[in-house]
Image (cartoon, grey):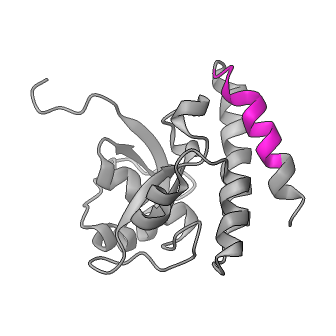
Amino acid sequence: MNGQPKFRWQATLSEATARSTAPLIGAVLTMQVDPLESGEHTVVLSNWRERMAEVLARDGAACVWCNRALEVGLVAATTEHVVPRIKGGPSWMENEVAACRRCNGERGHLSPSEWADECERRGWHPRRDVLVRALQSLQAAITERGGQRRARPYVASQLRRLVRYQ
């Protein structure tokens, strides 16, 4: 395997966002030489740190379930699949959000709406807007890329349940 990553992800972020997010998790994002006309740069995400930086830049540096700040050395950040892999969720950026290790581990295979309800029962403040945005983005990606037959109805049902509470 030569030390090269098996998978590569691609996303765009502003240069300022990339530079401000990288120190948060100890990653250095390398920008493509030619910036896009929109002022964004293409970033190839090839490892966990880079994927985590993109998730934090997109959704903010707080756990999607309990809303605790994710900071180096204080609260361990993890990438959480909104649609669990066991339910057919892909390992795409659109299906990943930032969560603290505690919430990620305790969620298990509960659906996003069930776990959000449980978080509220515990007195936490889940970020339903981030979950809805992630599910909408995933739904659009599935439509564009195709496949993900098992995830399609799951995404639609979770969107209906989460939108009900907004």
Q: Nearer the viewer, residue 1 or 10?
A: 1
The residue at 66%/34% (across/down) is: 141
Numbered-mark total? 0
Tell me: 139 left or right of 18: right
Residue 71, given in percent of the width and then of the height, sits at: 36, 78
Majority secondary structure of magenta residues: helix
Q: Is 161 located above or below residue 7 in the figure?
A: below
Residue 156 within the segment the image draws in magenta: yes
Front-lying residue, 105 or 29: 105
Instruction: Tell me if residue 110 can be seen.
Output: yes
Q: Position of residue 97 (x, y in %)?
A: 53, 56
* Residue 133 visible from this viewpoint: no
Task: Give the residues in magenta.
Answer: 148-159
- Residue that appears at 33% across and 73% down: 24
Position in image of residue 117 (x %, y %): 73, 64
* Residue found at the very far right of the displayed protein: 164
Q: Quadrant of residue 120?
A: bottom right
Q: Quarter-wise, where is residue 102 in the image?
A: bottom left
Q: Is residue 92 left or right of residue 45?
A: right
Q: Quadrant of the C terminus?
A: bottom right
Indicate left or right for 27 with 126 as reference.
Answer: left
